[in-house]
Image (tube, coloured by chain):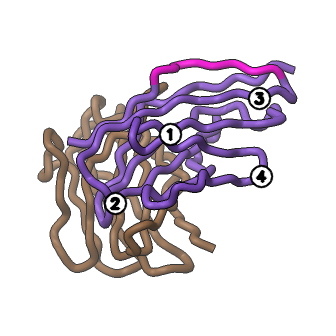
Amino acid sequence: GAVVSQHPSWVICKSGTSVKIECRSLDFQATTMFWYRQFPKQSLMLMATSNEGSKATYEQGVEKDKFLINHASLTLSTLTVTSAHPEDSSFYICSASAGTHNSPLHFGNGTRLTVT
Amino acid sequence: AQTVTQSQPEMSVQEAETVTLSCTYDTSESDYYLFWYKQPPSRQMILVIRQEAYKQQNATENRFSVNFQKAAKSFSLKISDSQLGDAAMYFCAYRASYDKVIFGPGTSLSVIP
């Protein structure tokens, strides 16, 4: 149980285009989803927290207009990287929590984004 | 603000031996949860073990166990009978109730055959 599906697993796009990454909880309802960014050999950096039906809460330094997050249902959250630039190239990982206060996070497999 | 520290960027262990990974954290909360996650080269995050702060008993999952010292804000992971498949990045993580999860910088574990 507790499977999180993230799609696509990798994507290459040109500068200036937008890319959408989907995160789905397949067998549980995710009241909260988190989006992380990970650079090579580094830890996970939290970008934003999204709760179903409300606006995402962004971490300091994360541009909300560049990284659009939508959590339209209890099983789906999307991250859209708008007007992508090469510096946005990274590994993006979503995770979902079932909502109980001691729930661990269940992670998607991540998306490797390369902007050329 | 809560912080998580892992003072060992890299560790190595001989196959079948035991290794302990260190983690300390800083918080003013009394109710929180601690986790160890494993990230192999596939980059999939895998939950290894978790500990509720209100529980005094240390959590155990097969070959994995923790030494939770609440007063010292220490949460170390012990891996017994190390296997080649244990080689990975290990992240210590903290979560206050209904709050975001904060990760430490990670420890890269190598297992020597």
What residue range appears in magenta? B7-14
Q: Name the side, left or right, on which A101 lies relative to B36.
A: left
Q: Secondary structure at mark 3?
A: loop
Tell me where residue B21 appears, x and y as whole percent. Answer: 59, 29
The local crowd at label 4, few if under 14, some if 14 to 19, many if 20 or more residues have their Cα within 10 Å, is few
The local crowd at label 1, few if under 14, some if 14 to 19, many if 20 or more residues have their Cα within 10 Å, is many
Q: Chain of mark 3?
A: B
Q: Nearer the viewer, mark 2 or mark 3?
A: 2
Q: Amino acid at mark 3?
A: Thr
Q: Earlier in the sequence, mark 3 or mark 1?
A: 3
Q: Amino acid at mark 2?
A: Asp
Q: Quadrant of residue A15?
A: top left
The local crowd at label 2, few if under 14, some if 14 to 19, many if 20 or more residues have their Cα within 10 Å, is some
Q: Earlier in the sequence, mark 3 or mark 4?
A: 3
Q: Which chain is drawn using brown?
A: A
Determine if marks 1 and 4 fall on one subunit: yes
What separation in Å lies between label 2 and label 1 (alpha carbons)?
Answer: 15 Å
- Label of residue B31 in the image: 2
Q: Is residue B55 above or below residue B12?
A: below
What separation in Å lies between label 1 and label 4 (alpha carbons)?
Answer: 17 Å
Residue bearing the label numbered 1: B75
Count of marks overlaid on the render: 4
What separation in Å lies between label 2 and label 3 (alpha carbons)?
Answer: 30 Å
